[in-house]
Image (cartoon, grey):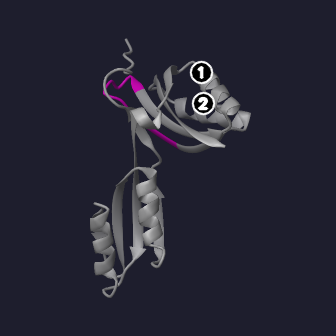
Amino acid sequence: MQKKVFQLLVDNTSGVLSRISGLFSRRGYNIESITAGVTADPNYTRITIVASGDDEILDQIEKQVAKLEDVRDIKELKPESSVYRELALIKVKADATVRQHIIQLSDVFRANIVDVSAEALVVELTGNQSKIEAFLNLLEGYEILELARTGIAGLGRGTDNITYLP
């Protein structure tokens, strides 16, 4: 099994995300992550989907999604010609004895401490999936109280592959 990252430009209408995710569930396709947000033009939404499967399934996903009425453009974001980022918020149990060590680890990863209490820290980390996984692996000796991850957002590099919609 392999993963592909698809970038969709869709009409910014109610239910569009539901229709896209419904296609995946009806066909039994797996979504690893999905992110959506309005573009510079409020008429359109950019959706980034990470899907997994064999080549045949991934090709079928791309063709089926492209047929949906709201989808204006779909393209694969290949790792060598794209930028991917993910946001993670990690609440770590941290009393005064371990707080400084977690702060030092966060500094190494250029993460931000966005909340501090007597019992916990909330760390904000942005980067590719491997950076976030590496940070989480270093926190294995600590108790992670809560974890929220956004999933991948991505854009192609440069100006060669931009889709302009009317």
Which of the 4 image quarters holds residue 20?
A: top right
**Total count of labels:** 2
Q: Is residue 71 left or right of residue 52?
A: left
Q: Of circles 1 and 2, which is in front?
A: 1
Mark 1 and mark 2: Cα distance apart in space = 8 Å
- Tell me the SS state at disc 1: loop
User: Is residue 66 in sight in this rendering?
Assistant: yes
Query: How far from the left and from the top, in percent, is residue 75?
Result: 49, 25
Query: How far from the left and from the top, in percent, is residue 125?
Result: 35, 58
Asked if the magenta segment contains residue 24, the reply would be: no
* In the image, residue 52 above or below residue 119: above
Which of the 4 image quarters holds residue 103?
A: bottom left
What are the residue bounds of the magenta stretch?
A: 34-44
Q: Amino acid at mark 1?
A: Leu
Extreme residue in the top direction = 166
Query: How far from the left and from the top, in percent, is residue 138?
Result: 43, 71
* In the image, residue 131 above or below residue 103: above
Q: Is residue 141 left or right of residue 99?
A: right
Mark 2 lies on residue: 19
Q: Residue at x 64, y 32 (%)?
A: 58
- Tell me the SS state at disc 2: helix
User: Is residue 37 in sight in this rendering?
Assistant: no
Q: Residues within 10 Å of mark 2 (few under 14, many from 20)?
A: some
Which of the 4 image quarters holds residue 44?
A: top left
* In the image, residue 65 above or below residue 121: above
Q: Is residue 51 left or right of residue 80?
A: right
Mark 1 lies on residue: 68
Contact between marks 1 and 2 (CB within 8 A): the answer is yes
Of the 4 image quadrants, the one containing the C terminus is top left
Q: Residue at x 35, y 20 (%)?
A: 160
Q: Residue at x 44, y 62 (%)?
A: 134
